[in-house]
């Protein structure tokens, strides 16, 4: 068996998410089926993160074990050929040692959240960004975001369905910047709770619109109560952008 | 009557182009119908450029004359409300003097052409860029592009259906740059012939792939013959990005 690490880009729109689910099309199922077609083997895909329905990935990292003798480049090409017309692309493929694990070896994850802040509806970026018509104060959002950076109990900012044993996470970075009428939020941590990025972004958007004051973000965090959450941002603005590994840094 | 200048963003995918055609949905028809709903008037839209089916616009400039007493911001909002769910957005609207003409007053047009240069198919950018799998030498493309800058008879680089009286145009800028696996071509001129940008990009792509040498681009230009064209690039990578006017510069 050879362990192959994959770098995967996908448009989350048509899928129930990355992870396999019983009755809905998932990115995992599409890739596993393509791998089965290529190798004849029952292949399981393991990934650095789980993404919800509608969430995109520019560079998800995953791995799978394959018995068939095949070069990484050939495997990548064959998977891509069999993934059509699904909007999933294998953009990188390399051999890794057997103890390299896309999820458990991962020491850092980065997400980007894209907001388009303008009156007019979205056209070219429909399904690719969160459209907010009211003016956002991105400086106020960035200031409030800094209250969330560091080690905290993020119970307020995680889904009721989050399966993680601990609600404590260490947020390394939560930067908000404006580029024209785009407001971009960049988040980095060793790992995130389910819905954590979207919950943080939704709450920051309330601050940006002046509906919440900065101190209310601190109070929501303190409350350790999902009911204290401001707002969960929609999935279409969220992109998984990078996973980091000790052997690659 | 008040003359309103519009700035328009659209996804060209679902349309036969900007300009009205008899039996296909056009951007012009959609906006004129929305304007009719808002004002009750038979409104004609005049635009800085004509774009083909599949070509996008980030900031097309157009104008229309309206008798109804309405503020620019209200008109913009009402048009956008009536354009849903078409991927067309009015992102700017202002009053102009009666002699301001979106097409005839325009002294410069800018286009951007986006290529994604990688093995894997496109996902998030499907329909938003030209996918070229073979390695492109963007430096060679830029060098060849400079042969096209200046005043030339662009017969080779215009559609057989081009209605312009003269095939001579002055190309002010044709820059090719690489940003990761994206290759971006930026073109600026007072005006362009029909298919000129796509014809130039298609030919440069042959140079980038090593199928054409630089001097062949000069020979194709010299030939003044459409049959000498290398390749017409597909529409989905092309974006109309700006129109320039003397009163705004």
Image (cartoon, coloured by chain):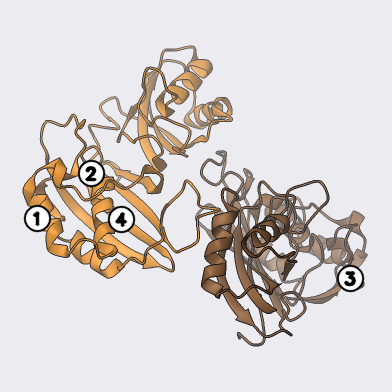
Chain colours: A orange, B brown
Q: CA distance from mark 1 to mark 4?
A: 22 Å
**Label 1 or label 4, whichever comes before in sequence order:** 4
Toward which corner of the image does residue B37 lie, by quadrant? bottom right
Which residue is situated farthest in the left direction here?
Answer: A222
Q: Provide residue A83's location: percent of width, then percent of height.
A: 54, 27
Give the residue displayed 78% in from the left and 58% down from the top. Answer: B199
Q: Provide residue A233's location: percent of width, then percent of height.
A: 31, 48
- Identify the mark at residue A219; answer none if there is no mark: 1
Q: Is residue B121 left or right of residue A155?
A: right
Give the residue displayed 46% in from the left and 48% down from the top. Answer: A128
Q: What is the chain identity of the residue bearing mark 3?
A: B
Q: Secondary structure at mark 3?
A: loop
Q: Is residue A8 left or right of residue A163?
A: right
Of labels 1 and 3, the one closer to you:
1
Of labels 2 and 3, the one closer to you:
2
**Label 2 or label 4, whichever comes before in sequence order:** 4
Of labels 1 and 4, the one closer to you:
1
Of labels 2 and 1, the one closer to you:
1
Q: Are marks 1 and 3 on the same chain?
A: no
Q: Are marks 2 and 3 on the same chain?
A: no
Q: Which residue is mark 4?
A: A186
Q: CA distance from mark 2 to mark 1?
A: 16 Å
Q: Which residue is mark 3?
A: B167
Q: Are marks 1 and 4 on the same chain?
A: yes
- Identify the mark at residue B130; answer none if there is no mark: none
**Label 2 or label 1, whichever comes before in sequence order:** 2
């Amino acid at each position: 068996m050879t362990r192959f690490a994959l770098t995967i880009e996908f448009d989350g729109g048509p899928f129930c998410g990355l992870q396999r689910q019983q009755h809905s099309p998932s990115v995992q199922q599409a890739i596993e089926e393509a791998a089965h077609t290529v190798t004849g083997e029952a292949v399981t895909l393991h990934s650095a993160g789980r993404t919800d329905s509608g969430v995109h990935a520019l560079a998800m990292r995953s791995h799978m074990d394959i018995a068939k003798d095949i070069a990484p480049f050939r495997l990548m090409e064959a998977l891509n050929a069999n993934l059509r017309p699904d909007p999933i692309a294998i953009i990188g493929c390399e051999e890794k040692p057997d103890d390299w694990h896309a999820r458990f070896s991962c020491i850092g994850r980065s997400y980007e959240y894209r907001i388009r802040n303008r009156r007019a509806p979205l056209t070219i970026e429909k399904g690719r960004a969160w459209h907010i018509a009211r003016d956002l104060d991105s400086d106020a959002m960035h200031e409030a975001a800094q209250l969330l950076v560091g080690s905290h109990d993020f119970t307020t900012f995680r889904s009721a369905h989050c399966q993680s044993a601990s609600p404590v996470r260490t947020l390394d970075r939560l930067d908000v910047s404006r580029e024209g009428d785009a407001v971009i939020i960049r988040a980095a941590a060793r790992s995130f709770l389910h819905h954590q990025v979207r919950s943080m972004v939704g709450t920051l958007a309330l601050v940006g619109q002046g509906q919440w004051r900065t101190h209310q973000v601190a109070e929501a965090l303190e409350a350790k109560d999902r009911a204290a959450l401001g707002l969960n941002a929609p999935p279409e603005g969220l992109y998984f952008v990078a996973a980091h590994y000790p052997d690659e840094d």
